[in-house]
Image: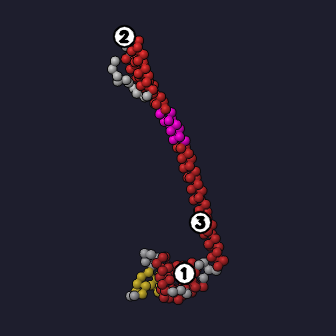
């Protein structure tokens, strides 16, 4: 507080403007620190002007710099004494831990949703595979039945008309043998 009133007095004693060197001397810091804080507080240079090579700060900016420099120096040194630094870091750690806990909770929720969806799709795939297997077996049964009916039709066609009994027995044996060996029709002429 003393520094601020001393600086305000110095600023008001002059022509309402002060240089960076004078601010640095009054605030107990370096000139680059004053310039850096001034750039942070007044980025569009509305409260400063040049007189030759010297940058002059008006009363508002000088007061703002005087108020901000101790905080700037304190932040640069690490928030004062070690106990304050530890408290600040504990607060930061608590905030990070809370954010991490929220992220983990969100991750667990999303993971659970995906796992439920995967289980649902896996059950559907298993059901469809079972149905496909049943349909394949049914198709094989139908194909075997069609083949059996074709063989019976071929034998019935071969037995049409008049045949001597010994020829009839030979035709039936030929078709039965062909069916046993997986052949579909008998190519031997009568």
Seen as rendered, the residue at the extreme front is 166
Q: Report the side of 133 relative to 161 (left or right).
A: right
Quick check: 188 above or below 25? above
Q: Nearer the viewer, mark 1 or mark 3?
A: 3
Residue placed under numbered mark 3 in the picture: 96
Q: Is residue 77 visible?
A: yes
Give the Cα separation between the discs numbered 2 and 1.
124 Å
Q: Residues within 10 Å of mark 1 (few under 14, many from 20)?
A: many
Give the Cα separation between the discs numbered 1 and 3.
28 Å
Image mark for residue 162: 2
Quick check: 120 above or below 9? above
User: Earlier along the polypeptide chain: callout 2 or callout 1?
Assistant: 1
* Picture residue at 43% right of the left edge, 28% below the top: 181
Q: Which residues are magenta?
A: 123-136
Seen as rendered, the residue at the extreme left is 189
SS type, badge 1:
helix
Image mark for residue 69: 1
Main secondary structure of the magenta stretch: helix
Q: Residue 185: percent from the left, percent from the top?
A: 38, 24
Taking depth in this image into account, of 111 and 12 the one nearest to the observer is 111
Q: Residue 154: percent from the left, percent from the top?
A: 38, 20
Q: Quadrant of the C terminus?
A: top left
SS type, badge 2:
loop
Q: Residue 124: percent from the left, percent from the top?
A: 52, 40
Give the Cα separation between the discs numbered 2 and 3.
100 Å
Would you say the residues marked 1 and 3 are in contact, meaning their CB atoms lie under 8 Å apart? no
User: Earlier along the polypeptide chain: callout 2 or callout 3?
Assistant: 3
């Amino acid at each position: 507080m003393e520094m601020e009133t001393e600086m305000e007095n110095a600023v008001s004693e002059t022509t309402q403007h002060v240089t960076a060197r004078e601010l640095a001397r009054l605030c107990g810091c370096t000139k680059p620190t004053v310039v850096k804080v001034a750039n942070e507080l007044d980025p569009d240079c509305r409260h400063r002007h040049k007189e030759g090579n010297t940058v002059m700060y008006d009363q508002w900016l000088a007061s703002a710099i005087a108020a901000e420099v101790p905080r700037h120096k304190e932040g640069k040194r690490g928030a004062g004494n070690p106990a304050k630094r530890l408290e600040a870091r504990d607060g930061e750690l608590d905030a990070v831990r809370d954010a991490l806990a929220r992220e983990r909770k969100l991750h667990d929720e999303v993971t659970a949703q995906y796992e439920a969806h995967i289980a649902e799709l896996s059950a559907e795939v298993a059901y469809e595979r079972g149905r496909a297997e049943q349909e394949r077996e049914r198709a094989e049964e139908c194909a075997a039945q069609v083949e059996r009916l074709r063989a019976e039709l071929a034998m019935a066609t071969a037995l049409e008309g008049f045949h001597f009994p010994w020829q009839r027995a030979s035709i039936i044996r030929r078709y039965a043998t062909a069916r046993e060996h997986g052949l579909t029709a008998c190519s031997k002429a009568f």
